[in-house]
Image: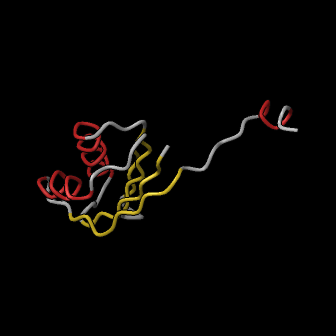
Amino acid sequence: MIQTTVGIDGMMCGMCEAHVNDCIRANFQVKSVSSSHRKGEALILSETAPEVVRLREVLGALGYTVTSVQSEEAPQKKGFFARLFSK
C-alpha cells in the first residue's frame, strides 16, 4: 500500500474536507482518504500513487490548490496475533 500526503490550500471547514474526500474517491481508486482543514492536507491510502497532475486538475476544479504531494510505502499495522506469531 502507498500512503500519499497531499497539501491542500483553501479548505476552511468540515464541508470542505467532505468535498475533497468525495472528489478524490470519485477520480481515483483509493482504499481510504481523510482530509483535515486544520492541517491543510489529505491522506490517501491506495495500491498505487495517484497521478500528481490529475490531483491538481480535479481539486483545482473545486477551487482548491494542491501545494505538495508526497508518496511513500504505508507503514504496516501489526495486530495482536501478528506479535504473538512473529518469532
Decide if residue 26 is on the left or right side of residue 44.
left
* Outermost residue toward the bottom in this view: 67
Q: Quadrant of the C terminus?
A: top right
Residue at 44 percent of width and 44 percent of height: 45
Considering depth in this image, is 32 or 63 the residue closer to the camera?
A: 32
Colour style of the rendered protein structure: secondary structure
Residue at 78 percent of width and 34 percent of height: 80
Residue at 28 percent of width and 69 percent of height: 67
| Picture coordinates of residue 64, whole percent (x, y) | 20, 61
Considering depth in this image, is 59 or 30 the residue closer to the camera?
A: 30
* Outermost residue toward the left in this view: 61
| Picture coordinates of residue 66, whole percent (x, y) | 25, 64
Residue at 60 percent of width and 50 percent of height: 75
| Picture coordinates of residue 26, whole percent (x, y) | 23, 36
Would you identify the image quadrant in which residue 4 lies?
bottom left
Considering depth in this image, is 32 or 16 the residue closer to the camera?
A: 32
Asked if residue 25 is positioned above or below residue 52 in the image, the reply reads: above
Number of numbered labels in the structure image: 0
Asked if residue 68 is positioned above or below residue 59 in the image, the reply reads: below
Decide if residue 64 is on the left or right side of residue 47.
left
